[in-house]
Image (cartoon, coloured by chain):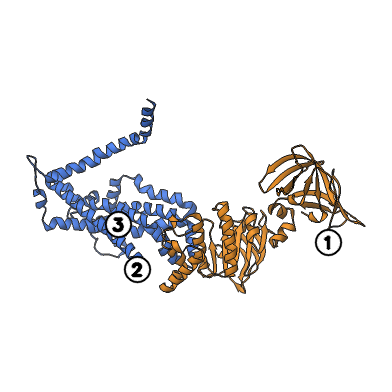
Amino acid sequence: MKDIVLKNVSKNYNGEPVLEDITLSIPGGQFFALLGPSGSGKTTILRLIGGFEKPTEGEIYLGDKNITDIPINERKVNTVFQQYALFPHMDVFDNVAYSLSIRGVASDEIEKRVQKVLRAVGLEKFIYKGIGHLSGGQQQRVALARTIINEPDVLLLDEPLAALDLKLRERMLIELIELQSTLKTTFVYVTHDQFEALTVADTMAIMNEDGDIEQIGTPKEIYEFPVSSFVAKFVGSTNILEGTIKKGAHGSQVEIKNLGTFEVAVPESKQWIKDESRVLLSIRPEKIEIRKSLVEGFSNKWLGIVEAIVYHGRSTQYNVRLKNDQIIQVFEQNEEHFEREVIDYDDQVYLYWQKENVVLLDR
Amino acid sequence: MKRLANNFLQEIPFLCSMPAIAWQIFFMVAPVGIIFYFSLMRPGFIVTLDHYRGLLHTSYFLIIFRSLLLATLMAFTAFFLAYPVAYFIAMRAKKYKTVLLFFLTLPFWVNFLVQIYAWYFLLERNGLINKLLLTIGIIQEPLMLSSSLFAIFLVMVYCYLPFMIMPLYNMLEKIDPRLLEASSDLGATPWQTFYRVTFPLSLPGVKTGLLLVMIPAFGEFVIPSLLGGGKNMLVGTLISYFFLVARNNASGAAFTCLSALALLLTVILFYAVSRLWVVSKIVERK
């Protein structure tokens, strides 16, 4: 279980900086997801670890070993490419056996190991099929088999499911998680899809457009406790409001211009929040209760007018305009256990939320 | 009426290809047919094999054999020279690609005959090459460069090289660079990547290139007649001799058919050998 450590790594392409002074530690034996918008440099990080590119500055370690200058073919790191990059002139067997035959492993040994790994990905029937005769999902499995047969220390996955349809993608995600927990290999999974990242990751890192790492944490930490409005907005949906903190004897409040003063909980860890601090409030759409009637027990409520209703199937999204003209998104589960009040366009509604469910951010 | 119009519309692609098909029939299929007809006919519309019988002489077979050997040797030499060039342009040249490809077409801007005469003056007894070598002192006597098989070979390689580079370049350029990355990612050295991925994927281009060069080189007659000095008889020169000098259309036609057959058999042989090689590799594994 070797950790991957990037120390002060920078990368320029033709003088244009893509990554600047990145320091990142990827824990060994984990499923690590690197999530960011396109152009954030996440694929560059992957290519640096894989050895496809050399960092302009900085060092990369695999365990205790500095691998910065080790050529790609000598690294125990393998990559599953976005479009699989299977060799079109070889059949499934030859593709999967490629790394072993390169190293001159005896042919009966190769035969045995190819059979075994193809059984693991459920492709034993396709062993002598040409690559062109396989579906997208099958090609994906061949690409996986081709890399794990090598027993690498690290498996890099570059948006591996981008070309698959939704159903297949969901199934492959589960299979990847199972594969990782059987192999105990470090998986580094690059994606721009927050759903994929949240599903697979033990730990995930969020990158912004400038190529900086905004936050590293478990999916739950990232989702529930984002450190910036960028993370809050990129992972899931959220409502961001601006306000000023008022600290008092009976807890803290936040004053939002043209809207009023509301109760908030300031966690111990956020020492930077003082009286009169300007803060951003992030509140997830599903943490808001929408009602036409008055309800007791919530710390805060807003009054607004329903502007749009979007039916998503498992939930319904309401866009509600507040007094200060800000639009608030609300998700309601369509559980339909009991008859509910019907909310329609232009209805006046109350939005209830708890003070613990708002995240206070400085940027 | 409407159905008729629809049917007509469907046939438009076919109608558009008619001029080209007609052209091919008039200027390709018909002449080949006429040659074949000549080779089998005696005055009075009698079918005969006499013209072929007249060619049963070692010197004729030697000429066919020599032409085949020259064409094959030339094609493979061109291949070995062309591959690195095509590889460089396709894989390494990046933004200079178009410029280099343009340079490759430059010789075509000069008339073919002018190029050959230029070579003639370069290679002749008092030519530039001999003068240069004499001045440097590498040789004492001028070399017999022109009027030799060597001169024919050299100029043929020069003329046919672009026809080898182009199909190779085309195939190499199409190779997804990620395949090469995947190969080295899986542990292959650059050399292993070349002979396991790059070269196998460029094979269709290799085949096209070899055919594209070998077939016309086999029948080439301008270069041998201008640079061969009349003594190195090849298929092309002999055919032109039969038709233009000896005015023996029947023998010329028979010899043409015979050498075409020899070429066809050679190409089939090459193809069979390459197939056998691939099949044996598959059989060996399973």
Q: Callout 3: helix, strand or loop?
A: helix
Q: Quadrant of the N terminus of chain B?
A: top left
For mark 3, what is the residue? B75
Disc 3 residue type (three-letter): Ala
Q: Callout 2: helix, strand or loop?
A: helix
Q: Which chain is blue?
A: B
Farthest-out residue, top: B1
Q: Which chain is orange?
A: A
For mark 1, what is the residue? A271
- Looking at the image, is A39 positioned above or below residue B32? below
Disc 1 residue type (three-letter): Gln
**Which of the labelled discs sits on residue A133, or is there none?**
none
Farthest-out residue, left: B44
Disc 2 residue type (three-letter): Glu
Q: Chain of mark 2?
A: B
Q: Quadrant of residue A327?
A: top right
- Looking at the image, is B193 positioned above or below residue A299? below
**Which of the labelled discs sits on residue B284, or is there none?**
2
> Depth-wise, is mark 1 or mark 3 nearer the camera?
1
Alpha carbon of mark 1 to alpha carbon of mark 3: how far? 79 Å
